[in-house]
Amino acid sequence: MIDTKIIEQARQTDIIAFFENQRGFLFTHRGSAYRCRQHPSLAVKNDRLSWYWHSRGTGGYGVLDYLIKIENIPFRKAVETVTSAETATSVETATSAETTLTRKQPTMASPRQEPEAPKTLILPEKAEIPNRVYDYLYRIRGIDIEIIQTLIREKKIYEDVQGNVVFVGYDEHNVPRFASLRGTYGDGGFRMDCIGSDKRYGFHMAAHTFSERLYIYESAIDAISGANLENIITGDKNAWWKYNRLSLAGTSDTALAYFLNKHTTIKDLVFCLDNDLTGELAAQYMADKYAGKGFNTRSAPPKYKDYNEDLRAWRDKARKGNGQQGAVKGWML
């Protein structure tokens, strides 16, 4: 049995120091949290112990929780990793309250690799009539019927038998390789990626005519909403197909890197990530990264939290009779 004092000392290890010294992560301190530069959705509170990885939907307290939940290291091995190699060899026999911990660098060289996703994407069964898709995307999310119909016709979205909206990402051969679900009941808070999804292939809307510009969003709904706002801003119902749009399904640039590798004519990148600290840091990181690769980059954050909130805000103002031009002001891309 591992001594409880050793466990407690491991739990109280400064996680920022551990990340920087043992994992090579760098952090920026802003307000009430530290944000990781390499993984912008990873945040650590000012106590330097409490952490949350937003894109993974997982958080915890201290290095032990991180090693167990993120790197899949068993509890005993996690304790040994945090404590010194010398202490680890005798940790099971240490019972004295006066046990001395010699803090050497943990010997684990790098995080474990994420397990590879299954090779075959498992898409949920399609509902015969997409009633919930129309109700949710049009009535709740404010997206034009014409856009919904086009995306259904192109098999980029559909409704499954459980009533969820399914957003599908295709590879260069038009084969489905990624899919995410979004609940349509209640507040629509349910969301998940389908088994076998490959995050290199994000949900995307290709321009119908040649375009060198790509708009990048965190979610499929925001990508669709941004396209819808393009119609409103320009007064052209077909403007939404003028540019390429890509969802990252989070704040990682995995899908972006792959998309650019397959679409070599893209020159201009516009980052439309959420208007919060995570989105801001991720947009800044990616804008700098891809500017260094020769792309023209800029950020175009939404006026509110995300582009769907912007779209719904415009709908609300329009319903209240404030006038289309006044409502649109502030949403220029």
Image (spheres, rainbow, N blue to C red):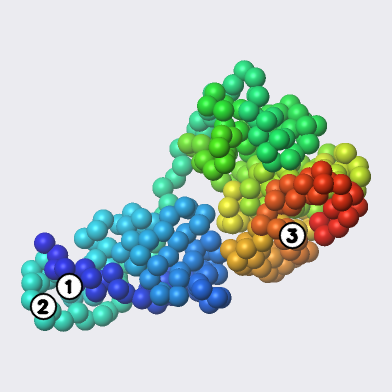
Q: Which residue is mark 1?
A: 5
Secondary structure of residue under mark 1: helix
Q: Is residue 18 left or right of residue 26?
A: left
Extreme-top residue of the structure:
128
Q: Amino acid at mark 3?
A: Lys
Q: Which residue is mark 2?
A: 97
Q: Amino acid at mark 2?
A: Ala
- Image quarter of residue 209: top right
Q: Residue at x 70, y 48 (%)?
A: 308
Quadrant placement of the C terminus: bottom right
Q: Which residue is mark 3?
A: 303
Q: Amino acid at mark 1?
A: Lys
N-terminal of the pair, mark 1 or mark 3, is 1
Question: Crowdedness of circle 3 by 10 Å Cα count: few (<14), some, many (20+)?
Answer: some
Q: Is residue 23 left or right of residue 149?
A: left
Mark 1 against mark 3, which lies toward the viewer?
3
Q: Is residue 66 left or right of residue 276?
A: left
Q: CA distance from mark 1 to mark 3?
A: 50 Å
Question: Crowdedness of circle 2 by 10 Å Cα count: few (<14), some, many (20+)?
Answer: few
Marks 2/1 in contact by CB < 8 Å: the verdict is yes
